[in-house]
Amino acid sequence: MFLAKPSRIIVFAFVMLMTSASRSGEPPEGQAAMPIVPDPIVQARLTELGKAVHDANDSERSKERFLRAIVALHPVARKDRTELVRQLLWFHTHATDIADGAVLPMVIAYVLQKGDLVHAIAPLLDTPDKPLRRSVLEVADLIENASPGRGPDFGHYRDVIGASHHFSQEIEPGLAGHMFERSPGDALRAFVIGTIEDGEQRKPFLWAGHVVDDMLWKVQNGFIKQQSGSVKPEDIPADVPPQLELMAARPEWWARLYVAAIMAQHKELATPELITKLRRDDNELVRKFIEQVQPTPPTP
């Protein structure tokens, strides 16, 4: 059936709207204006798609209306795909019903590709505008195929990281921060593969990530016991702290960010020496992550 796929997307949009409503906070007073200026022509076309979704049924007229609304967005995409994603984010942030909420996943499904999304959301992942950031994170979930019990797929981010490295361009801090906050191990691997071509040179980073991931897997599955939510210092595998120390001493800022992110999520792995070292780091993102960390007090 022609509308079978849109119907599934409407259900998904309902979940997105509920998730968005559950994410914390409204923007504080005096917060900077939303960094997207709505284009009235594009917004009108997105609104028409929302109406077509709202009134969708199995009639030929309904199908044609939906198709016209989708087709009307293709010239916008050909002109500037990144700007279409930004306009889509503005529309989604202001969505008030399920049909409007379905517009974002529908345009992604019928008009855009995941690579288009990455370039658009990367500068917005650290926006102070909380409603907009909720929408950006929903798009990030779509890019990463996020689901319970499975790590995120950072493959599309890895392509952007590789291209930025090749052309000696800065990685968007918001993108790096998002990746290391969401999954430090997967983020480390994405940066290694995206920036280091030689297999031998990759090995120290991949081994460090493997050693730490192995410990975390054992904790998650009960092979290493926790007490009050933390692993006791004597139960931390002996090979984990040296790997974190090696990564903290690396010249690559993202390796040091990995250590800060791991310690922010697993306080029992933090040591006063590493905290002091990373708080003096010349990378702002590393300092931001390590500020969350206090060393675990010694067991009495």
Image: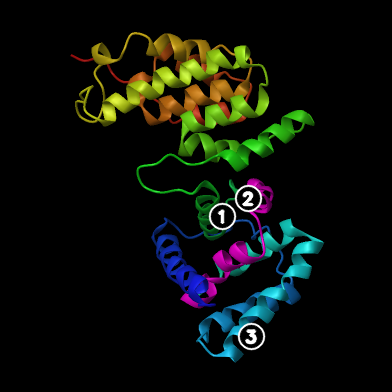
Q: Which residue, given by chain and number where applicable, does mark 3 sit on?
A: 65
The magenta region covers 98-123
What residue sits 54% from the left and 80% below the top?
A: 53
Label 3 CA crowd tier, 10 Å (few <14, some 14–19, many 20+) = some
Q: Give the prevailing secondary structure in the magenta stretch.
A: helix
Q: Which residue is more in the foreground, 268 or 13?
A: 13
Q: Which residue, given by chain and number where applicable, does mark 2 sit on?
A: 124
Q: In the drawing, does residue 33 fall left or right of residue 187?
A: right
Q: Give the quarter of the image for residue 242.
A: top left
Could you tell which of marks 3 and 1 lies nearer the N-terminus?
A: 3
Q: In the drawing, does residue 279 fall left or right of residue 45?
A: left
Contact check, label 2 and label 1, Cβ < 8 Å: yes
Mark number displayed over residue 112: none
Tell me if I can see residue 110 in this picture.
yes
Q: Amino acid at mark 3?
A: Arg
In front of the other: label 2 or label 3? 3
Q: Position of residue 264 (x, y in %)?
A: 42, 29
As for residue 134 lying within the magenta part, the answer is no
Q: Amino acid at mark 2?
A: Leu
Q: Which residue is more in the foreground, 206 or 64?
A: 64
Q: Secondary structure at mark 1?
A: helix
Question: Marks 3 and 1, how far apart in space?
Answer: 28 Å
Q: Which residue, given by chain and number where applicable, does mark 1 sit on?
A: 136
Q: Secondary structure at mark 3?
A: helix
